[in-house]
Amino acid sequence: MADFDRDYFIAVFRRMAETAETNRDEWTRLDGDIGDGDHGINMSIGFREVVKQLDAIPDDTDIAGTFKLVGMTLLRKVGGASGPLYGSFFMKAGAEVADQTEVSFDDLRRMLRAGVDSIQARGKAQLGDKTMLDSYLPGLDVLEAADAADPGAALTEFVARMKQGSDDTIPLVAKKGRAMRLGERSVGHRDPGSQSSWQLMNCFVEELAR
């Protein structure tokens, strides 16, 4: 029997919206240190629209359709670099499970890998460039090596490694995005996308625990 159904993912996305509201000012402050200072505001606007879309989602929408709806909404509503990156992430993740109403934990791992691959392809960034990939790539390595028999533990380890990856961005020199123009002055600051990434992925853990 599959572990995750559409209702689970809808609940996760609603948690993500709450997370974006709760952390809006922090994400904006982090982005103000090395970027445009609008990451939290943009993410909040995007996820507010996601909630509106989920409130009206047709009952026959499958998991792939749900992810596509969320991704398209973020692509349309979130400004800056984050909209295309997060939008692509969710759309590509959902495309991995077309026509499915339930997915296994292995499916979920495959979805998250596809999403991260799309971020890497779109942003042309690598590990160590001081971007959200410094959270995602080490986290995915842990997730893919984890025991599928305990999804809760595996997802917890995934998020913990992502959080460590975000911490690891602090001493790095930014090599991508607006922060790149600061050069050495970007050292000592956390990448805001790496922070929002692990906090959003933590919603998978929180909803599974519930």
Image (spheres, helix red, strand yellow):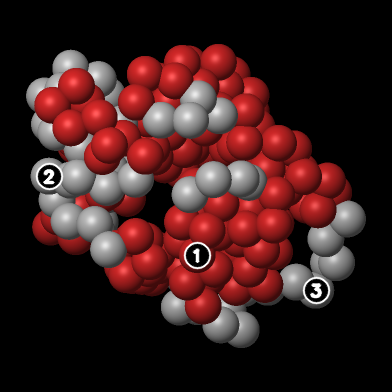
Task: Give the residue at x 57% y 22%.
Answer: 24
Query: x, y percentage for residue 101?
Result: 62, 73
Q: Specify the quadrant of the image occupied by residue 104.
A: bottom left
**Contact check, label 2 and label 1, Cβ < 8 Å:** no
- Which residue, given by chain and number where applicable, does mark 3 sit on? 60
Please state which of residues 197 and 41 is positioned toward the viewer in this rendering. Answer: 41
Please state which of residues 145 and 176 is positioned toward the viewer in this rendering. Answer: 176
Q: What's the residue type where badge 2 is placed?
A: Gly
Furthest toward the front, the residue is 181
Query: x, y percentage for residue 30?
Result: 40, 20
Task: Give the residue at x 50% y 47%.
Answer: 82
Other-residue count near label 1 (Cα within 10 Å), few / some / many at <14 / 14–19 / ≥20: many
**Contact check, label 3 and label 2, Cβ < 8 Å:** no
| Disc 2 to disc 1, C-alpha distance | 21 Å
Check residue 115 in the rendering and tell me which mark sits there, or answer none: none
The mark lying in front, picked from 3 and 1, is 1
Task: Give the residue at x 63% y 46%.
Answer: 78
Q: Is residue 135 visible?
A: no
Above/below status of 46 relative to 38: below
| Disc 3 to disc 2, C-alpha distance | 42 Å
User: In screen coordinates, is 69 left or right of 175?
Assistant: right
The mark lying in front, picked from 3 and 2, is 2
User: In screen coordinates, is 148 left or right of 107?
Assistant: left
- Which residue, given by chain and number where applicable, does mark 1 sit on? 88
Other-residue count near label 2 (Cα within 10 Å), few / some / many at <14 / 14–19 / ≥20: some
Check residue 128 in the rendering and tell me which mark sits there, or answer none: 2
Sequence order check, earlier mark of 2 and 1: 1
Q: Specify the quadrant of the image occupied by residue 156.
A: top left
